[in-house]
Amino acid sequence: MARYAAGDLEFILDRSGAQPLIQFRGSTEIVALTRSVGPRNDEIFKNDIGEQVLRLSGLGGGGTIYPPDRPQGVPVSFVQVVVTPIRLPVVPGGVELGVRAQQASRSISNALQRAVIVDIADYRPDAWSLIADAMNLAVKAIEINKERLRTDPRLSHIERVLIVVGDRPGIVINYDTIQITVVPLKGPAGRPSSALIALSLMRQVMGGN
């Protein structure tokens, strides 16, 4: 685990698990990354829609972060502090998970200005935290794109967000349902990011292109 900073921009990079994780200060979203090696042994980290998020120098000590509002990149430096592993917030029980599903339903319905329910296919205890996180990311993706989504006829039939447990994280839009698949064994890497959810919705608007 390591913390990096550049002025007001600060994030934690956690490489303790099978996939690297990154979380920015002030954000609740944990983004799972894939790693590759570039020129001069630089490490390149991308998110689940293929965007470069972070590049660390092969010489050590720093790198470049690519936040959405500064796509040209911002130099960052390693901060020597004790960092704890990134973890999803604990959901204490199935009843609480049901309450959060109702809250997500209200948020999405308000954003789209029509009734949309959030359903959970499997209340497995080992999936509670990941399901709650997936619901939050769906709300985030929809709220960011609400103006487009509420007016486009190609998504006017959406009336349900369904969270299922499966073997591979992903999102599929089946006519009236946005189905999000989570994989508990993968931890935070076991669900699509808000960026992937938003991209999938925008592809639907653009006819799959």
Image (cartoon, grey):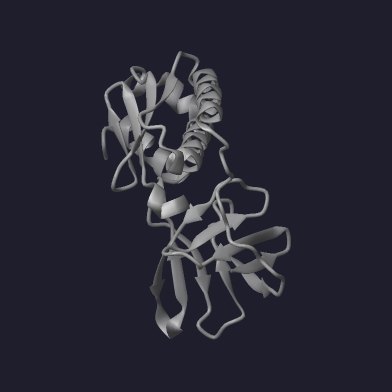
Name the residue at 27% across, 40% down: 209
| Quadrant of the image containing the N terminus | bottom right
Name the residue at 63% across, 70% down: 76
Along the viewing direction, whichever of 127 and 157 lies nearer the viewer: 127
Along the viewing direction, whichever of 116 and 74 lies nearer the viewer: 116
Q: Judge from the rendering whether residue 109 lies leftward or rightward of residue 62; answer left or right.
A: left
Q: Residue 55 appears at what percent x and percent y?
A: 50, 70
Q: Residue 164 appears at what percent x and percent y?
A: 34, 35
Name the residue at 38% across, 18% down: 159
Q: Is residue 177 visible?
A: yes
Q: Among all residues in the image, which is located at the extreme top?
A: 114
Quarter residue 75 falls in: bottom right
Name the residue at 57% across, 57% down: 86
**Total numbered labels:** 0
Q: Residue 71 appears at what percent x and percent y?
A: 53, 57
Quarter residue 201 falls in: top left
Q: Is residue 48 visible?
A: no
Q: Residue 187 appears at what percent x and percent y?
A: 45, 52
Classify 156 as above or below 203.
above
